[in-house]
Image (tube, helix red, strand yellow):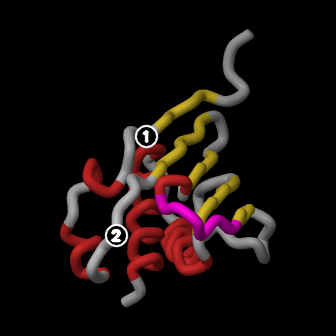
Amino acid sequence: MNVGLTVGMRAGMRAMAALNLGRAEAVRLEVVGGHFFAQGVEGVTGCSPIRDTLVFTQNTACTADWSVTLHAEETSVRVALREATYTGADEVLGLPDDVLFTADSLTMEGVGA
């Protein structure tokens, strides 16, 4: 399996878990990264450019700039990758989240003043 695809799947699952969402329950998804990374996130979240729920910005220069921002009705979470090079998908699958990702940024939307 492709490393970028696998990292994308892990990032999407991390974002869904932070918001306690199942597949296809998110309102919107923003992905910054490579094409395979975006496809991995799309596959696990169920968000898609076809349904106008996924916005993709290509950035292949540095994986530390790759991120997933998943939006629910009133909350959103941003999951960002740490800069690293992996030997294969099996390595990515075996790493703990804190090695792959920086701290999640959870925000409330449409609430308050």
Q: Secondary structure at mark 1?
A: loop
Q: Does 81 lie within the magenta span?
A: no
Q: Quadrant of the C terminus?
A: top right
Determine crowd level at label 1: few under 14, some 14-19, many 20+ residues with C-alpha closer than 10 A: some
Q: Secondary structure at mark 2?
A: loop
- From the top left corner, tell me how far across and down residue 57 is, in percent: 71, 63
- Name the residue beneath numbered marker 2: 85
Q: Which mark is residue 47?
A: none
Q: Amino acid at mark 2?
A: Thr
Magenta stretch: dominant secondary structure: loop
Foreground residue, 9 or 65? 65
Q: Earlier in the sequence, mark 1 or mark 2?
A: 2
- From the top left corner, tell me how far across and down residue 74 is, in percent: 64, 34
Nearest-to-viewer mark from 1 and 2: 2
Q: Which residues are magenta?
A: 58-63
Separation of residues labelled 1 and 2 (CA atoms)? 21 Å
Looking at the image, which residue is at 60% across and 28% down?
A: 108
Q: Amino acid at mark 1?
A: Asp
Looking at the image, which residue is at 52% across and 61% down?
A: 62
- From the top left corner, tell me how far across and down residue 98 is, in percent: 27, 48
- From the top left corner, tell me how far across and down residue 73 is, in percent: 66, 41
- Name the residue beneath numbered marker 1: 104
Left/right of residue 102 with respect to residue 26 in the rendered view: left
